[in-house]
Amino acid sequence: MKRSGRGFILPLNAYLYALAATMALLLGLFGWATLGEIQETGERLDRLEHALAREEFLLALSDTVDRIQGIAERLARWDEVRQQLQDSTYYSYWHQHRLRKTGTLPGFILEAGLYDGNGAPLARFHGDPLPERIPFTPNPRIWRSGERLLIELSHPIPEGPHSPAGHVVLQADLLEAIRETFSFSRLDFSAIDVRDMPEHAVAVETLPGMLHLRPVRSMARQEFMEAVEQAMIRLTLLVVFLALALLAFFSLLVRRPLTRLSEFVTKLRKGELSEEDMLHSQPIAELEAIRASLQDYHLQLETARLDLDERNRELWELAHKDPLTGSWNRRAFERDWKNLRSLLDGTRMEIAFLLFDCDHFKAINDSYGHQVGDEVIRIIASRIQQVLRRGDRLYRLGGDEFATLMLECGRECAEKLAERCLQAMHEEDFSRLGIHEPVHLSIGIAISDAGSLPDLSELKRRADTAMYHAKRPGTHHICFHEPQMDEDEGMLYSSRAIHAVQRAVRHGEGVEMHYQPVFDLHEERVIYLEALARLKQDGELLMPGQFLPTVEAHRLEEEFDQAVLRAVSEDQERGRFPEGVGLSVNLSASGLLSKRVMQLLGELAGIAGGRFLVLEITETTLITRLQDATRQIRLARELGYQVALDDFGSGYSSLRYLASMPVDIIKFDISMTRRILEGGRQREMIEGIAQMIGRAGYRTVAEGIEDEQALEIIRRAGFSHGQGYLFGKPARDTLPETTVARP
């Protein structure tokens, strides 16, 4: 080592060692920083996957709780539930054979019960898991029982404005309900372990924080990260090897190339490489290989970064777009609505909310298969998107339901767009999919100005209401929401009941008539059969309590009466009724006043072959439209019908009204029959009324006779006819041999 005026002059090897040490240090720092970035990126992706899994679980939990609450609300509005609150004599039988009957409640509902207005159960059963009294807090509440999570909630049964008539209490298997309701793509649902949960009851909103929610691991991402790390290790080893080779074989002639290479590495680390630096090569092949390797590594890292950005974009789109149609999903819809409210704050602009629904899509899906159904959904989305203006987004809210929000679009603009959507669907040739029936859209539209934007749920409710009005038979497939529509009760019922009613009134499909005999107590024989409607849907029979609220809410009583009369006429033509036995049909108020219904009554009378015919009408129908109803009844009598006043005692029950009603038969409601069987003052009063009505020339029918003891009491009370399970249950087979005559 020598010393000069400029400082120490070191041997070449010393410079090479120093250079090698410097390069090793730079490469180590660069590799450490790069590895840290890769690990940080992996941690961010892990946090994102956990967040998506938690959000997916929250959505599934919310939907499932809403579904259980909807079941409780449906039970609370069930007429039979109210009957049990009024008279709980047969509650144990009803609970076992009606409420707990297979098909009444979903399988994940473990127990259900009724409580009176004071919070006491109507009855306690052995091993009953429901609470001894209500209310309970929190409501709903969740607790662990073994390896299951149970949810329990109560719902009031409305009676008056201040206090409920009682309560419905449901207990369900929460995890089983979620499994039936939701399909997870981000959350590993099978990994949820409830054993660390406390056994005391907690509120629904605290549940996610008590569970360990594990996301579904992405194998592709894990393999990619491992590949990057291995590539980095291999490249580092290669650079170290080349650096050591420099110490042994390079001479002073490589000083400049080494210096240039050092500068290249520095610029590479700082991200300051120019195009000239990228193109400039080293004079020594080995150094050029190092430079090229570093440059390729830099390009690989850049490619990896771009790939990660693309993967993040794909994850974002997966979370906000529908995979089947490419339309935006419900999450994007709610996010856009939130952004829209903030953007339009303080401004006034008309906004049109259009809700699209495919008529009878479930029938198409069931008849032609899910692949055809999916293709129909894709076609609907494509045709609507083609009609929308540039920049308008189409959202798939679920199933066959789509929606769009249109800014600066009033009633005329929305109507034109809806018409174009219907035209586009009309022009589509669905026969190429094997579908030969027309595929129609029903469109509900709600218009709002930005100065008074309602909540998203309220705007969707308005469009829902309009859309279901658009589905009514004989109406256009486009309907705007009007304030008076909100007076209709129960517009949104189960899709199964809605679909069954629509099939019945539009195509006469699924209507199955069951018949229950009415027995003449004096002649000891069946005098006529009462026709009772059932609807077939998905292989099951829907009872009147399941579909009549939908008929009434959608004002389809007249159309439904027509479907029933056609079904009874078909049974008559097929010879389902024994000779000498009459036939009774029920009519609604609007059906009684319908010209088409009267025509169908005439056609039935024409093919009945002189059979005894009865027309059953409720007293509410007669009292509210007495003058119009009397005129129609006169026409029915001319056709050969006698008229029965149905459910006497459940409505007005006024003898003053009865004297003015043009009827021949009085059918006492089952509640009146039960009061006779209970004895006491009520029996004496009802017996007196029945005898007085009988002396006035009316035939009297007692409903709900189930055993010989009840029959004997009804005979002594003076009734001329009886109806109930003792004589025969409603059945498709019209008249069992045992009910034709009694000894």
Image (tube, grey):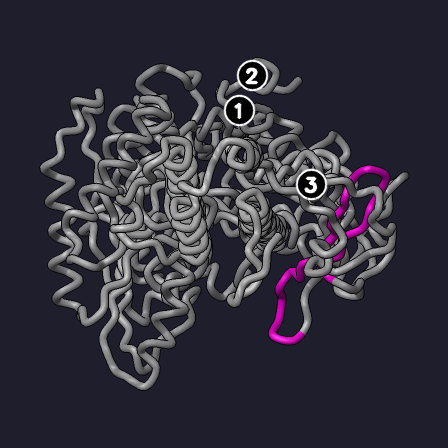
Residue at screen point 30% across, 78% down: 450
Q: Earlier in the sequence, mark 3 or mark 1?
A: 3
C-alpha span from label 3 to label 1 = 39 Å
Residue 140 covered by magenta stretch: yes
C-alpha span from label 2 to label 1 = 9 Å
Residue 173 covered by magenta stretch: no
State which quarter of the image contains the C terminus. top right
Residue at screen point 33% across, 65% down: 485
Q: Secondary structure at mark 1?
A: loop
Question: Looking at the image, can residue 632 be seen?
Answer: no
Q: Earlier in the sequence, mark 2 or mark 1?
A: 1
Give the residue type at disc 3: Leu
Percent coordinates x, y for residue 619 in the rendering: 46, 56
Asked whether 436 or 373 is in front, the reply is: 373
Task: Kindly check if marks 2 and 1 are in contact, taking CB atoms under 8 A apart as contact.
Answer: yes
Residue at screen point 52% across, 19% down: 735
- How crowded pointer 1 is (Cα within 10 Å; few <14, some 14-19, many 20+) is rated as some
Give the residue type at disc 1: Ala
Checking the image for residue 175, the label placed there is 3
Say left or right for 427 vs 378: left
Task: Kindly check if marks 2 and 3 are in contact, taking CB atoms under 8 A apart as contact.
Answer: no
Q: Earlier in the sequence, mark 2 or mark 3?
A: 3
Q: Which residues are magenta?
A: 139-162
Say left or right for 379 vs 463: left
Give the residue type at disc 2: Pro
Q: Quadrant of residue 531?
A: top left
Residue occupied by mark 2: 736
> In the displayed structure, would residue 506 be above or below residue 405?
above
C-alpha span from label 2 to label 3 = 46 Å
Task: Kindly check if marks 3 and 1 are in contact, taking CB atoms under 8 A apart as contact.
Answer: no
Say left or right for 64 vs 578: right
